[in-house]
Amino acid sequence: MNQRQIALGAEYLRQGRLVAFPTETVYGLGANAWDAAAVRQIFAAKGRPADNPLIVHIADYATLDQVVDHIPPAACALMQAFWPGPLSLVLPKKKQVPAIVTAGLDTVAVRWPNHPVAEALIRQAQVPVAAPSANRSGRPSPTLAQHVAADLGEAVDLIIDAGMVAIGLESTVVDMTGSEPILLRPGAVTIEDLTKIVGPVSRAGYAPEQPVRSPGMKYAHYAPQAPLYLYLGEPSTVVQAQLGKAAELASQNQRVGILTYDQFAAKFSAYTPLSLGQYDEPAQAAQKLYQQLRRFDELNVDVILAHGYPSEAGLGLALQNRLIKAAGFRLVWV
């Protein structure tokens, strides 16, 4: 752990500057959550819509009390079970939290990341840190420091490099402000994990006229430069459909990228296959997903045919959520 970089990053945060830092989920782009001018720089650097709220990162419960107005018992139970970790909770906010952080809502999403660099940075800065993923808005989230540099460049004052992140998908977000918890964004803390602690958890829909309660709900996200089509169905049928479409596109002089799994990759040797690892191993696929989507950009493919994830249980729900968003809802059922 680079203590000098962490100390410099903490000083930069206190000064109102932007710092990109690793978490266990993805790299975040952080600013002092108390400093509205600093937070505005996040939106400018990312090209992020102003009605898309940010998550506030903390590293102790004393800071939580400064940010959140009220913590229901069910939220306390989830904190005890999953913090530090990849779980963000939407709770009533204190008035002093700037409106730009919460997109004008009276709620705020808060999480305590489980990464030694993130925890040390936040503690040394002695301020809560507002931080979305450290990428251009709509692009695949960064799982390596190089991704941050490629997307944001000099818009960031400091990038703290701690190598590849452990999980690779953004945190689970749960709204705890109503009578029943509502899953706003799936992640590594699964809906099955949540129900073991607090009982039934609803899954949120979204209507365009509604305010955005969580990152990842409204806008296009996680997309590579080439259009991505997500194939859904029985594995052998999906592979055959991908092969047929790839041959058709190649005959039109299209460079075809194939997002697949180890078991099937050899079948696509005539094209540009990238694997998410072993089929039915969600942790592998999660960690590799955004890196592989960015790799397709480097390979300058014209179109991507992606194999959907086999299960929407557990971490598979989060993977399928990100793949559907990356595809812009271009779904091919076979």
Image (cartoon, rainbow, N blue to C red):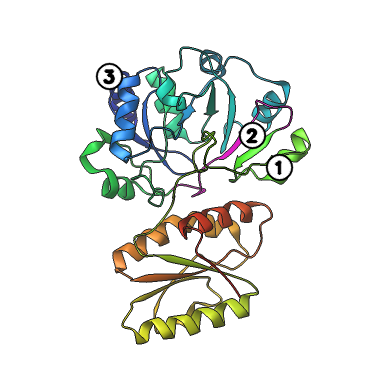
- SS state under label 2: helix
**Mark 3 closeness class: few <14, some 14–19, many ≥20 residues within 10 Å:** some
- SS state under label 1: helix
Q: Is residue 218 left or right of residue 320?
A: left
Q: Residue at x 40, y 52 (%)?
A: 140
- SS state under label 3: loop
Tell me the number on the disc at residue 193. 1
Tell me the number on the disc at residue 82. 2
- The reply to whether the C-beta atoms of the residues labelled 1 and 3 are less than 8 Å apart is no
Q: Residue at x 47, y 27 (%)?
A: 56
Q: Is residue 295 left or right of residue 153?
A: right
Q: Is residue 184 above or below residue 267?
A: above
Of labels 1 and 2, earlier in sequence is 2
Label 1 to label 3: alpha-carbon separation:
39 Å
Q: Magenta region's main secondary structure? A: loop
Please tell me which residue lies in front, 82 or 232. 232
Please tell me which residue lies in front, 331 or 183. 331
Amino acid beneath label 2: Phe
Q: Is residue 99 above or below residue 279?
A: above
Q: Which quadrant holds residue 43?
A: top left
Please tell me which residue lies in front, 246 or 279. 246
Q: Which residue is mark 3?
A: 15
Amino acid beneath label 3: Gln
* Residue 55, percent from left and from top: 48, 31
- The reply to whether the C-beta atoms of the residues labelled 1 and 2 are less than 8 Å apart is yes
Q: Residue at x 41, y 60 (%)?
A: 293
Of labels 1 and 3, earlier in sequence is 3
Label 1 to label 2: alpha-carbon separation:
9 Å
Please tell me which residue lies in front, 31 or 182. 182
